[in-house]
Image (spheres, helix red, strand yellow):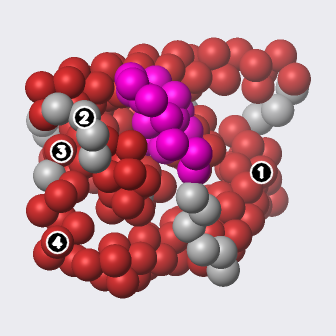
Amino acid sequence: MPGNSIREFLLAFIPLFVALNAIGIVPIFLSYSQNIKRVELKHILYRATFVSFTVGIAFVLIGEYVLKFLGVNISDFKIAGGLLLLIFSIKEIFSEQAELKRVEGDFSVVPLAIPLLLGPAVLTTLLVFKGIYSIAIIALALFTNLIIGALILWYSDLIAKLMGKDGMKAAGKIATILLSAIAIMLIRKGILEIFI
């Protein structure tokens, strides 16, 4: 991978990593997976990763045509996407983690793939990236993040013991603050593109 491509990959990877916030998903995942055997849990994580990746890339490809049909350019979407991410991050910073209802059996698609792994923050980030990076860079950044997220969830028992409840909460809040900074950056870039 050439130097410029590595830089683009990292610039796409980091905001997605922050938006996905796998550490923040750990407590919810633990509540769903406590009575599930490890073999089945592995299949659930495989399915969730596949579904998240497929839906995410499809959303990027279809979203571009929807924007064109509506007459919205990428600068407009950067501002709108940045505002949504900012609102989302502010809401997350000042709210406690809501408890989701317990589910029975396979939870790989709902709620694990959507909306936990592929939530509104990730989808907005992906669509904004369409006007900045190639589909190959976006796909690689998304796939890498989903694999890391799946690994974090696979070792969620160990992570929960090491970090503790307060540690995981703090990590989630820090990631949310970083997401708000990325949101401001997107808004700034969109405004500059319109007026310059």
Q: Which residue is mark 3?
A: 154
- C-alpha separation, residue under disc 4 versus residue under disc 1: 39 Å
Position of residue 35 measured from the top left corner of the image (x, y, whole percent):
27, 40
The tag earlier along the polypeptide, 2 or 4, is 2
Q: CA distance from mark 2 to mark 1?
A: 40 Å
Q: Which mark is residue 20?
A: none
Q: Where is the N terminus found, in terms of image quarters?
A: top left
The amino acid at mark 3 is: Trp
Q: Is residue 24 left or right of residue 121?
A: left
- Mark 4 Cα within 10 Å, few/some/many (few <14, many 20+)? few
The residue stretch that appears in magenta = 100-119
Q: Amino acid at mark 4?
A: Lys
Mark 4 or mark 1: whose residue is earlier in sequence: 1
Q: Position of residue 61 (x, y in %)?
A: 56, 18
First in residue order: circle 2 vs circle 1: 2
Provide residue 21's location: percent of width, then percent of height.
Answer: 40, 58
Whole-number angstrom distance, CA of label 3 to CA of label 2: 12 Å
Which numbered disc, 1 or 3, marks the residue that appears first in the sequence? 1
161 and 178: which one is in front?
161
Identify residue for label 2: 36
